Amino acid sequence: MYTAQGKIDQQAMMEQYMPMVRRHALSLQVRLPASVELDDLIQAGMVGLLDAMGRYDNSHGASFSTYANQRVRGAMIDELRSRDWMPRSVRRNARALDQAVGRLEQRLGRAPEEREIAAEMGVSAEEYHQLLADANNGFLLAYDESDSENGVTAVADGGPPSPFDALISDDNRTQLMAAIDALPEREKLLLGLYYQEELNLKEIGAVLGVSESRVCQLHSQAVSRLRAKLSH
């Protein structure tokens, strides 16, 4: 939408893309702690939308809608990063999870079962499931501090990658595809439904016959398996 002078009509564009901003905010909020307010995410997203309007250049080939989506989501995740909301204990436990999975993979020569991972970490099944739920929040943003150092946080060039995208960018695709193929079937299906079919947690739970919280746990476990395998 443009004015008679050929400039973007900001007010009209803000109204047109507000539902998109809200959609991204809701998508993020369901994976975050209750302390993260929806309005804060929406506000950050609107800042990203304004930034997109000021920076968009149609000579680069991407549509404004695609560019705006990237900017909006990137602005929200930048806001979350700036708060450093994720407790260090969760980051530490997530790294310990990767390491435990890696040790078991090497020792057993196969994908370890949940009870085996819990035993390796010295925790109960209930504690392990809680650890997975907590770690899943971390996979949404940068997995640990090293990701920031490697440039994963750079939003200005097109938005942050999902955990799955980050794995693709950090390792060659052939190796990643082999790692995904080695996942347990249910976790492999979950990744496909989430990142390729773009189903939400409730929809994936219906397909797999499990709760939404269980979907989060399985997602966290699958990504940890991939990171452990690709780090060798």
Image: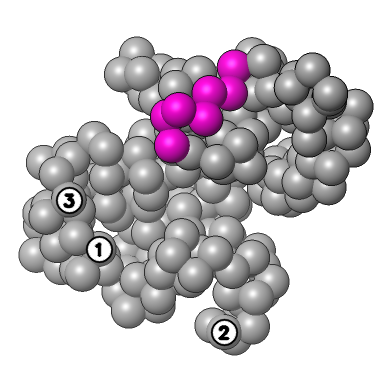
Q: Is residue 114 above or below residue 165?
A: below
Q: What is the C-alpha distance between the residues marked 2 and 3?
A: 27 Å
Of residues 160 and 158, the one nearer the viewer is: 158
Residue 56 shown in magenta:
yes
Q: Amino acid at mark 2?
A: Val
Q: Amino acid at mark 1?
A: Ile
Which residue appears at 25% of the width and 63% of the height?
180
Q: Where residue 42 sits: x, y (%)?
A: 82, 32
Of residues 24 and 20, the one nearer the viewer is: 20
**Which residue corresponds to mark 2?**
207
Q: Is residue 186 above or below residue 155?
A: below
Which residue appears at 64% of the width and 65% of the height?
200
Count residues near mark 1 (Cα–Cα under 10 Å), then give few for <14, some for 14-19, many for 20+. many
Q: Is residue 156 above or below residue 73?
A: above
**Which residue corresponds to mark 3?**
173
Of residues 43 and 125, the one nearer the viewer is: 43
Q: Of the residues tagged 2 and 3, which is closer to the observer?
A: 3
